[in-house]
Image (cartoon, rainbow, N blue to C red):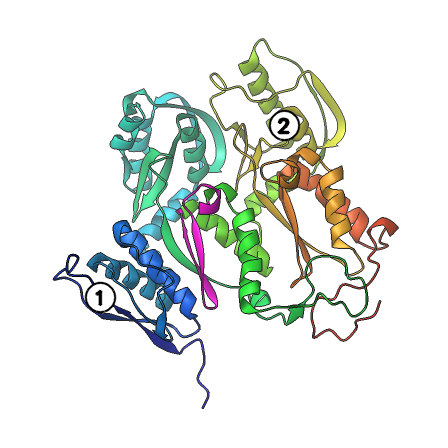
Amino acid sequence: MKMNRFSVFSSFFVLLFLSASNLSAETEVRTYSLPADLTQNEARVLLYLAAEEGDPTRVPDPETPAELRLEMKAAVPQNVHEVMERFEKLLAEGNPKPTPEETKLRTVLDTPIDAEYAQKPLAELLREWEERFAVPFSVDLKSLEEEGMELAEITVTLKTRGISLRSVLDIALAPYGLTWETDGGELRILTQIAALKYEWRVYPFPKSVLVCGLIVPRGKVEDPWPREILEWTPDLAKDAFIGPLTRFVAADSWVENGGGGRCIWAGERFLVQQTPKVHAKIERFMAQWNGNFRESDSRQRILTALETPISLELKEGDDLESTTLGAIAAFEEKLGIPIFPAEDVSTVGIHVDLPWSCREMPAIEALGTVFGADQIEIREDCATLGVGTMCEEPLFWPLDHRVDEEKLITALEEEIHPDFWINNGGYVGSVGFDAATGRLLIQNSLPILYEVRKFLQENTLGDIPERFRRETLRLRSIHEQEYRP
C-alpha cells in the first residue's frame, strides 16, 4: 500500500564530531524526525540555521556531504540541539495555537473604544485600560531609557470614536517611536527597536505553486512551438513564489535588504523568521494569493468611502500645524471615517499643498494630491497620514491570455506615476507576472493602485487595445492542448 507522503517522516541524524580542543561533556548524538519530502540540501540549511542561532561561533559548513538521505555529520554545540528541536516540532505540529490568555488579549485589542485625551500621561492611561479590560499592561522601562526617554514625559492627545484599541495604541505610541507587543496574555509597551524580535513560523506552499507542469518564462512567445520552454521543477516553483512574497511583504525587513527576516524552503512548506507583525502581513498575503481573502467589514467601509467622489475646498491655516490638522479634519468630516496623523505635526511636518479645491474627485485621489501619494495608510478601522506610512498594498489581477504582459507592465511603469516604481528608482512600487496562475502581482500605495485598477479595467477587460494584444498565445502549461494562435 502506498503511504501518504505527507504522513511519512524520515530520520535526520546529526552526528557530532568535535576536535579534542572543542570536546564538551554535553555533546551527544540525537535523532530528529523531519518530513520525508525535505531534500538533503533543505535539511542542511536547517542545521546551518540551528547552529547559527544556537551558537554563532561554531557554525558548521552547510555544504557538509550527506552520507545518507537526511543524514549528515557536523560538529555542533549542545545548545544547537535546542534549536533543532524547535524546528522539528514546528514542522511536525505547525505554528503554536494561541493560549486562552492570548485569545482574550486579541479580543481586547479588537474592541472598539471611544477616546478623548488631552496631554494624558501614558502611565495613567495604561492603568485605566488595565482596570477596564482586565488584562495586564506593562512598560519596558529599560528600552525607553536606552533611547533617552522617561515614562513620566510621555503623554497622549487623541480624540476618536469607535476604532479598535489596537489602532488607538498604534496612533498614540507612534509619535514617540514606541510600539506594543504581546507576551502571553500581557501587553507590553516598548521602543520600536526593542520590538524587533524574530520568531520562526511555518507556512504551506500554495498548491498552484507546486503543481503546474511546464511553463514558458515571462516574455513574448515568438512562434507556436517556442524553444524557451522551461521545465517547472519544484525548486523553480518555490523560488517563483518566495520572490514575490519577500518583495511584496515588508520588503525592507528581509536579510537581503538589510533586515533580519529569513525564508527557507522545507519540502512542501516554507519556514519564515520574522517579527509577529510581519507574520500577520504574510498570513494576509497568503490568503490573497490563494483567493480566499476577505476584507473586514470595517476596512471595506473605509475603502468604499475612499472611492467616493467628493467636492472639497481647503484653505491655508495660520501655520503648518493648523493647516495640516485643518485639512485632515475636513477630509474626516467629508468622508465620515477617522483619519490621524502618523506623527506629531507640531514637530514633524506632513506634506500639505494648500490652498486646494476639487469637484467630484475620488477621495483617494484627493488625499494623494493634498498629502502625497506615498503618505497614506489604511488600517483596519482608520486611515493615517505622514512620512513613513507607505502602504504596501498588493493587487492580484487575473490577466486575459490575449494580453501581452510585457507590454502591459511597461505601460504601467511608464504611464502611472513613473517615479513610484522600483524599476524607475522608487522604493516600493513593483509589478510582476505569475505564469503559473496567469495573474499580475502589483504593489504600490493606495492612491496609485486606484489608478492602476482603472487602467487595467480599461485595457484588459472586454476588447483588448491593439497596443497590448499578444502576437501569439501565451503558453502557460504543457498540459494545455492549444499551442497555436
Do tag 2 and tag 1 residues touch (Cβ < 8 Å)?
no
Where does the image place residue 50, in percent across and percent down from the top left? 31, 58
Work out which residue is located at the far bottom of the displayed protein and give it: 1
Q: Residue at x 57, y 69 (%)?
A: 233
Total numbered labels: 2
Mark 2 vs mark 1, CA separation in Å: 60 Å
Q: Rate crowding at label 1 as few (under 14), some (14 to 19) or many (20 or more) other CA atoms within 10 Å.
A: some
Name the residue at 26% across, 31% down: 141
- On screen, 371 above or below 103? above
Q: Secondary structure at mark 1?
A: loop
Would residue 292 be seen by someone viewing this image from the given angle? no
* Left or right: 79 as drawn, with respect to 118: left
Name which quarter of the figure residue 79 lies in: bottom left
What's the mark number on residue 17? 1
If the image is split into quadrants, where does the C terminus sit? bottom right
Residue 280 position (above or below residue 151): below
Residue found farthest to the top: 318
Q: Say which of 280 and 87 sits in front.
A: 87
